[in-house]
Image: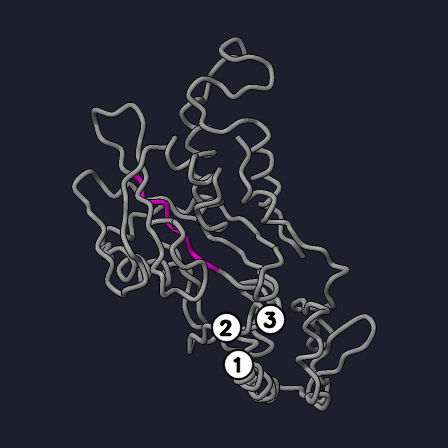
C-alpha cells in the first residue's frame, strides 16, 4: 500500500520560491507567485532575483516584529492571509534558537517560516487483544486548515512562550479531554520534518510525536469545539484511511511513525526465515520502503 503523505512531506520545488532572509539568515520561503502581494512594502521587504529580505535597517526583534505586523495586517485585509489565530509564533530555524522576529501564526505559511507542533498517538491496548487500537479524531468543519479531515487524538502548533510538553498537555485537554496527570504519562516517540508547498504557501514544520496508552476505559471528549468526533479504530483501518489520504499529512506521519516503532518492537528478534526477502517480519504493519521513507523524514530540511 502506498501512502501519499510520504511524498507530500517533501513536495517542494525550491525553484518556485525565493528564500526569505532576516539578518543575513534564511528563515523561510516565499513563493514567486506571491511576490506581487509585497508591492508597496519595499521600505520593509526587499525583493531581488535571489531573495526576499527584511530590511537590514530593522536591527532589533521589536522593530522587525512591528514592521512585519504591518505587512501581515495588510495581507490579511486583502484576503491573502486567512485563518487569523491571534497566536504568536517566533521566527527561528530551531526550537531553542532565539527569535529574530514575532509574527501572527496565520502568516507563517506565507513566509514559509519554521514552525513546530506536538502530536499524540492515542493508543488502547486491551489485555485480551492481540493488537492495539488507535483513537482518531475528525477535525471540525470550522477549522481553518484541513476541515473535516481525520487527525491524531491530539495535535497542535506550539506558540511562542510554550514548551513542547506544555503545548502537549494543553492540547490534550482542549482537544480530547485528557487530564494532565494522564497526559504526563505520554512518551516522546519520534521527530519528523515536513517541507511541502501548500495552498497557503510553504509548510516547514518539525513534528514532536508522542505516544500514550490511554486505557480501555478512556473516552475522548472535545473541549474547544475544534474536533467534530472521535473514533476507536483497528490498525488496518487507520492504514486504509492514511492510504486514501483521508487523514492530514501531519497526522498520517505521526501515526505511521508510531506503527514503525511499535511494529519494530513487537517483531524484535524475529529471524530472517520468518519472512521473505524484502517483506516485513510477521507482525510488522509497515513494509521496508515505508519505514525507510519515514527514516528519511527524521532529517532536518535545512
Contact, mark 1 vs mark 2 (Cβ under 8 Å): yes
Using the image, tell me which numbered label, if any, was put on residue 76: 1
Q: Of all residues shown, which one is farthest toward the left?
A: 217
The quadrant in which residue 57 appears is bottom right
Sort mark 1 into few (<14), some (14-19) or many (20+) by Cα contacts within 10 Å. Answer: some
In this view, 280 is above or below 98: above
Q: What residue did someone put label 2 on?
A: 106
Judged by its main secondary structure, the magenta piece is strand
User: Which is nearer the eye, 296 or 34?
Assistant: 34
User: Is residue 22 rendered to the left or right of residue 123?
Assistant: right
Sort mark 2 into few (<14), some (14-19) or many (20+) by Cα contacts within 10 Å. Answer: many
Q: Is mark 3 on a helix, strand or loop?
A: helix
Extent of the magenta region: 117-123
Q: Is mark 1 on a helix, strand or loop?
A: helix
Camera-nearest label, 1 or 2: 1
Q: What residue did someone put label 3 on?
A: 110
In this view, 265 is above or below 7: above
- Name the residue: 60% across, 19% down: 278
Camera-nearest label, 1 or 3: 1
Specify whether residue 145 is painted magenta: no
- Name the residue: 22% across, 31% down: 126
Q: Sequence order check: which comes first, mark 1 or mark 3?
A: 1
Amino acid at each position: 500500500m502506498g501512502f501519499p503523505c510520504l511524498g507530500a512531506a517533501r513536495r517542494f520545488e525550491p525553484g518556485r520560491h525565493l528564500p526569505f532572509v532576516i539578518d543575513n539568515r534564511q528563515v523561510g520561503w516565499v513563493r514567486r507567485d506571491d511576490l506581487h502581494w509585497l508591492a508597496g512594502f519595499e521600505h520593509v521587504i526587499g525583493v531581488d532575483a535571489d531573495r526576499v529580505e527584511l530590511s537590514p535597517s530593522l536591527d532589533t526583534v521589536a522593530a522587525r516584529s512591528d514592521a512585519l505586523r504591518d505587512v501581515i495586517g495588510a495581507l490579511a485585509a486583502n484576503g491573502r492571509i486567512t485563518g487569523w489565530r491571534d497566536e504568536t509564533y517566533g521566527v527561528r530555524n530551531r526550537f531553542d534558537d532565539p527569535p529574530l522576529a514575532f509574527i501572527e501564526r496565520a502568516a507563517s505559511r506565507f513566509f514559509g517560516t519554521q514552525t513546530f507542533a506536538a502530536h499524540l498517538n492515542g493508543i488502547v491496548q486491551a489485555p485480551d487483544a492481540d493488537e492495539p487500537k488507535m483513537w482518531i479524531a475528525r477535525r471540525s468543519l470550522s477549522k481553518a486548515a484541513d476541515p473535516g479531515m481525520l487527525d491524531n487524538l491530539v495535535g497542535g502548533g506550539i506558540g511562542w512562550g510554550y514548551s513542547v510538553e506544555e503545548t502537549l498537555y494543553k492540547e490534550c485537554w482542549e482537544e480530547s479531554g485528557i487530564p494532565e496527570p494522564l497526559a504526563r504519562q505520554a512518551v516522546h516517540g519520534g521527530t519528523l520534518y515536513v517541507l511541502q508547498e501548500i495552498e497557503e504557501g510553504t509548510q516547514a514544520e518539525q513534528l514532536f510525536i508522542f505516544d500514550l496508552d490511554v486505557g480501555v476505559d478512556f473516552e475522548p471528549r472535545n473541549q474547544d469545539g475544534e474536533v467534530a468526533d472521535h473514533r476507536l479504530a483497528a490498525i488496518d483501518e487507520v492504514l486504509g484511511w492514511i492510504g486514501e489520504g483521508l487523514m492530514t499529512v501531519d497526522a498520517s506521519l505521526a501515526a505511521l511513525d508510531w506503527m514503525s516503532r511499535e511494529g519494530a518492537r513487537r517483531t524484535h528478534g524475529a529471524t530472517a526465515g520468518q519472512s521473505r526477502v524484502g517483506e516485513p517480519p510477521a507482525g510488522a504493519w509497515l513494509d521496508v520502503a515505508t519505514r525507510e521513507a519515514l527514516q528519511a523524514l527524521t532529517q532536518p530540511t535545512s
